[in-house]
Image (cartoon, grey):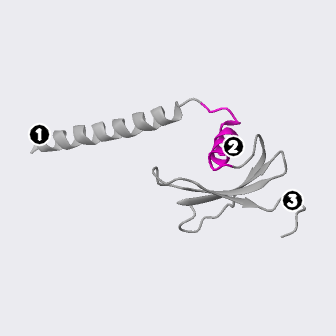
């Protein structure tokens, strides 16, 4: 009977060790430069054939409703005044959707 208790304790200890070492490794990842996301979005826009050499701002809605963590819409304003809505999916094989929006001050 004591052997089973010892096996359970050692199994629990190994699970806890794996959990804490995994979280430490995740926190040890290097911080990305602040303009990495801007570059990534500029490349996505360029791959769809639009002109956006530099990004001025990115805005995304903060919404905790179910489903918003899967589709992430972002509105990108380029330095040349053009605006785009980019929707990325949580799925790795899905391509982002890029739609041009009216420029600031432009009428529909």
Residue topped by disc 3: 104
Location of residue 83 in the rendering, given as x and y in whole percent from the top left corner: 77, 55
Total tally of numbered discs in the picture = 3
* Residue 1 relative to residue 100: left or right: left
Q: Residue at x 83, y 58 (%)?
A: 103
Q: Given this view, does label 1 or label 2 mark the residue nearer the observer?
A: 2
Local packing at callout 1 (Cα closer than 10 Å; few below 14, some 14-19, many 20+) is few
Q: Left or right: 10 with respect to 30? A: left
106 over 6 or under it: above or below: below
Label 2 crowd (10 A; few <14 / some 14-19 / many >=20): some
Residue linked to disc 2: 42
Instruction: Tell me the SS state at disc 1.
Output: helix
Q: Earlier in the sequence, mark 3 or mark 2?
A: 2
Answer whether residue 39 is magenta in the image: yes
Helix, strand, or loop for circle 3? loop
Residue 44, disc: none
Tell me the magenta residue range: 31-49
Gap between marks 1 and 3, in whole Å? 72 Å
Give the class, few, some or many, for how many residues have Cα within 10 Å of label 3's Cα (few <14, many ≥20). Answer: few
Mark 3 vs mark 2, CA separation in Å = 18 Å
Q: Is residue 18 above or below residue 50?
A: above
Res. 3 mark: 1
**Which of 68 and 93 lies nearest the eye of the viewer?**
93
């Amino acid at each position: 009977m004591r052997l089973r208790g010892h096996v359970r304790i050692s199994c629990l200890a190994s699970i806890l060790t794996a959990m804490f070492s995994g979280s430490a490794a995740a926190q040890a990842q290097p911080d990305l430069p602040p303009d990495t996301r801007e570059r990534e979005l500029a490349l996505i826009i360029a791959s769809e054939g639009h002109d956006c050499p530099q990004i001025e701002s990115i805005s995304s809605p903060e919404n905790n409703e179910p489903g918003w963590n899967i589709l992430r819409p972002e509105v990108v304003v380029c330095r040349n005044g053009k605006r785009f809505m980019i929707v990325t999916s949580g799925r790795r094989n899905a391509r982002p959707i890029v739609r041009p929006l009216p420029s600031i001050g432009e009428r529909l």
